[in-house]
Amino acid sequence: MDKPATPNSFRTGPDEQGMFGIFGGRFVAETLMPLILDLERHWNEVKNDPDFKAELTDLSTHYAGRPSKLYFAEGLTKHLREVSSAKGLGGGAKVYFKREDLNHTGSHKINNCLGQILLAKRMGKKRIIAETGAGQHGVASATVAARFGFPCVVYMGATDVARQSPNVFRMKLLGAEVRPVTAGHGTLKDAMNEALRDWVTNVEDTYYLIGTAAGPHPYPELVRDFQSVIGTEARAQILEQEGRLPDTIIACVGGGSNAIGLFHPFLDDKEVRIIGIEAGGRGLDGIEHCASMNAGAPGVLHGNRTYLLQNSDGQIMDGHSISAGLDYPGVGPEHSWLRDSGRVEYVPILDDEALEAFKLTTRVEGIIPALESAHAIAHAVKIVPAMDKDQIVIVNLSGRGDKDVHTVASMLGMEI
């Protein structure tokens, strides 16, 4: 595939049809099209509405706890500089964490959920449905539904229900109904399939609160815009703390909402290297990974055209990741466009590399990161020692790791 021409700005998409180049769009059942068009109409009304923005800002500040901190990871920086010195490398860059783990509910997901629940209220909807993998979006959806008095149903793959039991309990405490999905491998893809089926059946009163920057237009755009608060804050914070922009920013990519939230405000800063980290699972040689942009091909899933894991017949493969939140065989369409345009690099990290980064961060920083975030930290561990001491790296710490302690204990052969 020929590399597309470099646009004047990487921040202008999507177009009116919801396309980022050849990616995106809305490939949905006819019964959903009126609902999608109604959602788009309301989204276009509220995204520049000062009253809507003021209400979202107030909730983000006083309920969710924004702005999240930009934290100099002194312990990790010191450790990686010692590695650099021992290997005779560049000295080791300074590492900062964007602390989305400090938000209410423990991850970046609350940013998007607050925006969408206000949109659902504006549209007059009476019921919320959501899909979840690691459970963080399910918890955030259940949280905002409780806050605004909406009944909420969360679809979650049966495999993820088993490995994310603390989040399942939290959702139920918040009043949500958690519906396990046994189809397929019982992971995020299957949960999203069931949520879409529910939506088709209950189009009049139901709002589908999608958790990632995928799905039919306008979801990739609106989720990105609600999550861009991450990069907007990080950009202002690093300018205040260091007096300049970072050299590199890194975030994990499943569907890609935390990553596009960090990346988007930096896309036109040509001097900033941007790296998205995919789930390499047990290696790209087989099928036990979720690195759709490194080992997949363009196709259509969940209402949009994007890079997908698929076999030679075009059937979607399930893949694998130690991290439930990255266990998805596709990616948001804007990431696919950024990959093909060359603006963002996408790199796989293996399960065992993420696990080592999880343990290292916990030990040297006193911060237990989500396994998703540990993938991004693992890549920083690889590249920071070879960088110069005056260089700066920001890693998006998209969530906290409380939810993952049972998974990690099992991987380490320990019991809780």
Image (spheres, rainbow, N blue to C red):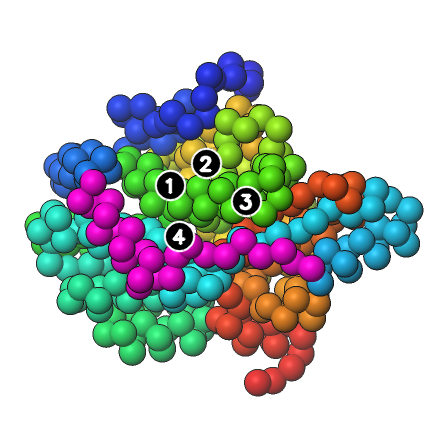
Mark 1–mark 3 contact, CB under 8 Å?
no
Residue extending farthest bottom: 416
Q: Look at the image and give the residue range highlighted in magenta.
A: 50-74
Instruction: Choose mark 1 or mark 4, whichever is in front.
Output: 1
Q: Amino acid at mark 2?
A: His
Residue 401, visible in the rendered structure: yes
Instruction: Specify few, some or many for label 3: CA neighbours under 10 Å numbering under 14, 14-19, or 20 or more.
Output: few
Taking depth in this image into account, of 219 and 50 the one nearest to the observer is 50
Left or right of 189? Residue 117 is: left
Instruction: Choose mark 4 or mark 2, whichever is in front.
Output: 2
Mark 3–mark 4 contact, CB under 8 Å?
no
Instruction: Choose mark 3 or mark 4, whichever is in front.
Output: 3
Q: Amino acid at mark 3?
A: Glu
Taking depth in this image into account, of 80 and 235 the one nearest to the observer is 235
First in sequence: mark 3 vs mark 2: 3
Q: Which residue is mark 3?
A: 240
- Residues at marks 1 and 4, CA–CA distance in whole angstroms: 20 Å
